[in-house]
Image (cartoon, rainbow, N blue to C red):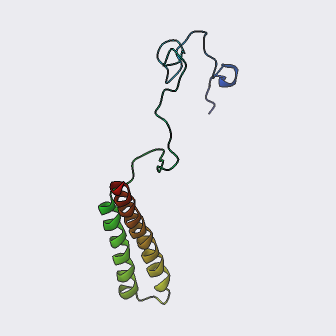
Amino acid sequence: MRVACRDVAKRPQNKRRPGSRQPGTPGGGRDATPSGGPRRRGFDPAQPFQVGRRPSSPLLLMVVGLMWVAAGVIALFAMTASWRLVPAIAFVGVGLYFVRGASATVLRRDRRSQR
């Protein structure tokens, strides 16, 4: 069965008309400030900088980490196979990564509140 599709390669993808609005700028592609100065507040290299989503709450990270550790303990004692150490160590390791992330978040918030 043959499906007809449009030739996408011939269409210009990133060409814009002169004077059209660029994303992130008000109006027709002009700077946000008439003087051409900085549009954002200054960047302080001493402050931690984060791009993207906000971090997860430390309580959620701790609960998920403890659930993984509990799954590792259950796998260690409930499984009867001789290779039960493999999933138990993997589950506990994943749980410890979550617990480490929760503690790092708590310490980071504590340091920021002291400033």
Which residue does the image show at 46% across and 17% down from the upper left?
26
Q: Residue at x 30, y 67 (%)?
A: 63
At x 66% / y 19%, what residue is drawn?
A: 12
From this view, report whether residue 80 is shown above or below residue 100: below
In the figure, residue 97 lies in which quadrant?
A: bottom left
Describe residue 10's horizontal placement relative to residue 69 as left or right: right
The x, y position of residue 80, in whole percent, is 41, 89
In the image, 47 versus 49, the foreground residue is 47
Q: Quadrant of the N terminus?
A: top right
x 65%, y 24%: residue = 8
Total numbered labels = 0
Residue extending farthest to the right is 10
Q: Is residue 23 above or below residue 105?
A: above
**Which residue is at the front of the view, 15 or 115?**
115
Residue 51, given in percent of the width and then of the height, sits at 48, 44
In the picture as drawn, the residue positioned furthest to the front comes out as 115
x, y percentage for residue 38?
52, 27
Quarter of the C terminus within the rendering: bottom left
Q: Quadrant of residue 18?
A: top right
Residue 7: image location, x then y, percent: 67, 23
Q: Nearer the viewer, residue 107 or 88?
A: 107
